[in-house]
Image (cartoon, grey):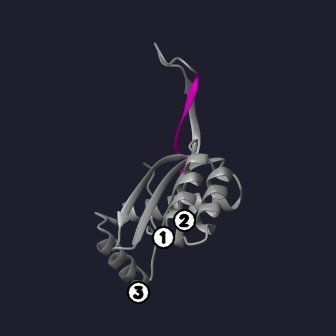
């Protein structure tokens, strides 16, 4: 690892140390690395340079609205190539929270997330996205032997 030194005014250092303690970091270095990764990932997205990624769409909806539930399920099934999994969490007798995990191109994930959040009756939709890059392409021995590639964090 490469080392570098930074200087912070006392108030900023104290606030940063409080953030580190609140989040459970063991040291400043880990916290700084995560902040840098987060900012670099945001910059990749803003510049349109992140072609691949993983993300989550989390939203609340009335699970008793069966038409809404069907719309949401159909949308997920129509995009089975993006949807890795979906977790439902009951919040009360009427409301549920779904978290949909997605993997694919940035454009496809963003379009799907926007459509899902826009479904009438879906409330409090939030998207979290992590940019990835293609790693090596290869074939495995034995079936299935199709050429495929892996994705790894961009930063």
Identified at 49% across, 64% down, the residue is 66
Residue in view at x 58 percent, y 59 percent: 71
Q: Nearer the viewer, residue 155 or 14?
A: 155
Circle 2 residue: 68
Mark 2, residues whose alpha carbon is within 10 Å: few (<14), some, or many (≥20)?
Answer: some
Judging by the rendered image, the residue that carries numbered circle 3 is 11
Q: Give, as a single range, the part of the protein colored magenta.
A: 147-155
Q: Which mark identifies residue 61?
A: 1
Residue at point 57%, 27% (across, down): 148
Asked if disc 3 and disc 1 are in contact, CB closer than 8 Å, the reply is: no
Asked if the residue at tag 2 contacts the one at tag 1, i.e. Cβ–Cβ closer than 8 Å, the answer is yes
Regarding mark 2 in the picture, which secondary structure is present there? Answer: helix
Q: Residues within 10 Å of mark 3 (few under 14, many from 20)?
A: few
Q: What residue sits 64% from the left and 61% below the top?
A: 115
Comparing marks 3 and 1, which lies closer to the viewer?
1
* Main secondary structure of the magenta stretch: strand
């Amino acid at each position: 690892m490469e080392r570098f030194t930074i200087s912070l005014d006392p108030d900023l250092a104290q606030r940063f140390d409080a953030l580190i303690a609140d989040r459970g970091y063991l040291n400043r270095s880990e916290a700084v690395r995560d902040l840098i990764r987060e900012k670099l990932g945001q910059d990749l997205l803003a510049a349109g340079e992140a072609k691949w990624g993983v993300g989550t769409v989390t939203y609340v909806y009335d699970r008793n609205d069966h038409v809404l539930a069907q719309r949401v399920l159909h949308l997920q099934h129509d995009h089975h190539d993006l949807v890795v999994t979906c977790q439902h969490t009951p919040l009360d007798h009427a409301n549920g929270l779904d978290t949909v995990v997605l993997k694919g191109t940035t454009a496809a994930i963003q379009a799907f997330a926007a459509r899902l959040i826009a479904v009438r009756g879906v409330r409090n939709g939030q998207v979290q996205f992590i940019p990835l890059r293609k790693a090596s392409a290869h074939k495995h021995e034995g079936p299935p032997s199709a050429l495929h590639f892996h994705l790894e964090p961009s930063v």
